[in-house]
Amino acid sequence: MSLKYTVRNEAPAVIILLQGRIVTDLDTVDLLKEIQTNLDNNQKSFFFDLSQLEYITSSGLNFFVRILTRTRNVGAEVTLCGIQGNVEKLFTISKLNEIFTFSVSIEEALNNVNAQ
C-alpha cells in the first residue's frame, strides 16, 4: 500500500494521520502542498500520527526534514506521534530522533500544547 493520509484541523494543531508507506518523493507531493497551505494560513502546530506508517525510505526521511525546515522557518512546530517499529529505527539510525519532537500519542501532544 502506498501512502494514504488524513488531515484535520483540531485547534490548536493540524493533525495528520499517515498510513502505509513512503517510498518515493511522489508519495508526498500532495501532502506537502496541503501542509504549505496550512502554513500559509498561519497554522503553528503540526502533529503527525505515525502509528499506522509501516515503512519509509530515505525519501520519507527527506519529507520529514523538509517539513521541519518549512515549519521552523515560520515559527511553527512539528511533533511526531506514535512512531514505532522500522520507522522508529530509521529515525534513530539516521540520528533524526535528536532533532524532532516526539510524543507517544496525539492526545499526549495536545495535552502538552494545551499545558503551555
Image (spheres, rainbow, N blue to C red):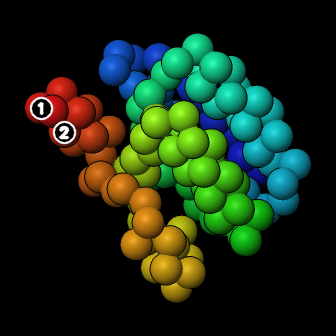
Q: Is residue 12 above or below residue 66?
A: above
x%, y% of residue 66? Answer: 67, 52
x%, y% of residue 87? Answer: 54, 68
x%, y% of residue 95? Answer: 49, 80
Q: Is residue 74 above or below residue 99?
A: above
**Residue 21 circle label:** none
Outermost residue on the left side: it is 115
Asked if the residues shown at circle 2 and circle 1 are in contact, with their CB atoms under 8 angstroms apart, the answer is yes
Q: Is residue 12 left or right of residue 28?
A: left
Q: Which residue is mark 2?
A: 112
Identity of the residue drawn at 27% across and 53% down: 104
Identity of the residue drawn at 72% across and 35% down: 31
**Residue 115 circle label:** 1
Q: Nearer the viewer, residue 1 or 34?
A: 34
Q: Quadrant of the C terminus?
A: top left
Tell me if I can see residue 21 in this picture.
Answer: no
Q: Is residue 82 left or right of residue 116?
A: right
Element type at marker 2? helix
Identity of the residue drawn at 12% across and 32% down: 115
Identity of the residue drawn at 62% across and 43% down: 70
Label 2 to label 1, Cα distance in Å? Answer: 5 Å
Give the amino acid type for the residue marked by disc 2 in the picture. Asn
x%, y% of residue 92? Answer: 46, 79
Q: Is residue 37 left or right of residue 104?
A: right
Structural crowding at the residue carrying mark 2, measured as other residues with C-alpha within 10 Å and reported as few (<14), some (14–19) or many (≥20): few
Question: Would you identify the image quadrant in which residue 49 lies?
Answer: top left
Give the amino acid type for the residue marked by disc 1 in the picture. Ala
Q: Nearer the viewer, residue 33 or 41?
A: 41
